Amino acid sequence: MKRIVKAFTISFAVVSLMATFATAQTFRHTTPSLRPSLVFGAGFGAVSNEDPTFTAIDFPGSTGTQAWGINPSGDIVGFYTGAGVTHGFLLSGGNFTSIDFPGAASTSPSGINARGDIVGGYVDADGVTHGSLWSSEDLTFTSIDFPGAKSSEANGINDEGDIVGDYNLVNKTSCCFQGQTQGYELSGGNFTTIDVPGSTITSVSRINPRGDIVGTTFIDKPHGFTLIAGVFTTYEASPNATYTNGLGINPQGDVVGRYVFNGFHGYLLSDGQFTTIDVPGAVFTGNTAINPRGDIVGRYRTPDGVFHGFLLSRHKETFD
């Protein structure tokens, strides 16, 4: 087990603030087929003859672990709790590496691209949340702060280096649908605000190599949304869901996330069909990311209240 603690660059380059997206009306849809738990759709692909299996991900010695990102090579990032402190991790080739932004009170990676660049958030000594980028090229950290915002987070990064995330104009944290949370895309040094038309809150989670975006928005209740070719589409994972978020999207356009209806469930949206995904024995399942070969990572909670990360894949893995 290794630990990454490298020099870092404070603050991102000076950027221009571009106009808020307002390219189309919001379309709400519910794809009609909500298939049973653990019945898998096209997003898993014909990559092998193996049935998909869950593999638990627990950082050694931790009291809780969550997996939030996976790249095409199967490298996984997330965070864990140890001695009451939240640390990031990278799981690559079966080996865990701890990731801590220098001087931070907590570090929470959430996305990784094919190059191995990692984005996420960290909380400083004053309790303020910042976005972060860890570059695999020069092994340095960079803070990502939306201009004028009280707090920022970086949630996803694609292979071109485009980054998406959230910012909040009034609160020290942009977490958990607090007031005035808005999404952004950072591309070529320029920030663009992303607001779903008609919403009060927009959170952007991922961007794939084509530039397709997925996230969560609040319009009377939380909905998932996609932004593809300038068109926003909102959706619910179940007609009776009280909450739906969108957290991951791969190059094929398969989407994963979580919904609430008679419990907390993960879902896969592929080729217009929803598949419910529940870790056996868990009281909470939430999918967070999906890679090109259909491997899904996420988090689940056991009846004792402990969170664990998971990998759902046709490829057998063993994590020590």
Image (cartoon, helix red, strand yellow):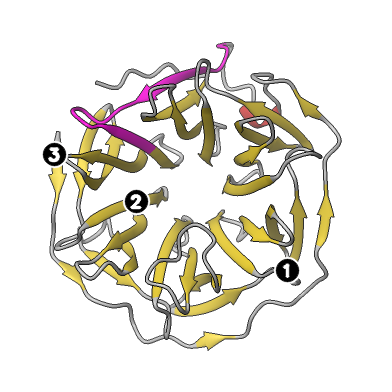
**Nearer-N-terminus badge (1/2):** 2
**Camera-side residue of 282 and 276:** 282
Q: Is residue 46 magenta?
A: no
Helix, strand or loop at label 2? It is strand
Instruction: Report the residue at 59% width, 11% height from top.
Output: 49
Amino acid found under the numbered disc labelled 2: Pro
Residue 88 pos. (x, y %): 27, 46
Q: Earlier in the sequence, mark 1 or mark 3?
A: 3
Question: Which residue is disc 3 drawn over?
Answer: 2
Pointer 3 or 2: first along the chain: 3
Q: Which mark is residue 109?
A: 2
Which of the two residues, 2 or 279, is positioned nearer the viewer here?
279
Q: Note whether 291 is above or below 125 in the view shown.
A: above
Q: Is residue 182 left or right of residue 236?
A: left
Which quadrant of the rendered structure holds the N terminus? top left
User: Which one is in front, 201 or 293?
Assistant: 201
In which quarter of the view is residue 316 placed?
top left
Residue at 62%, 67% in the rendered image? 201
Mark 1: amino acid: Gly
| Residue extent of the magenta highlight | 50-66
The residue located at (36%, 87%) in the rendering is 14
Q: Nearer the viewer, mark 3 or mark 2?
A: 2
Instruction: Give residue 127's mark.
Output: none
- Under tag 3, what secondary structure? strand
Q: Badge 2: few (under 14), some or many (20 or more) residues near its Cα, within 10 Å?
A: many
> Looking at the picture, which amino acid does disc 3 mark?
Lys
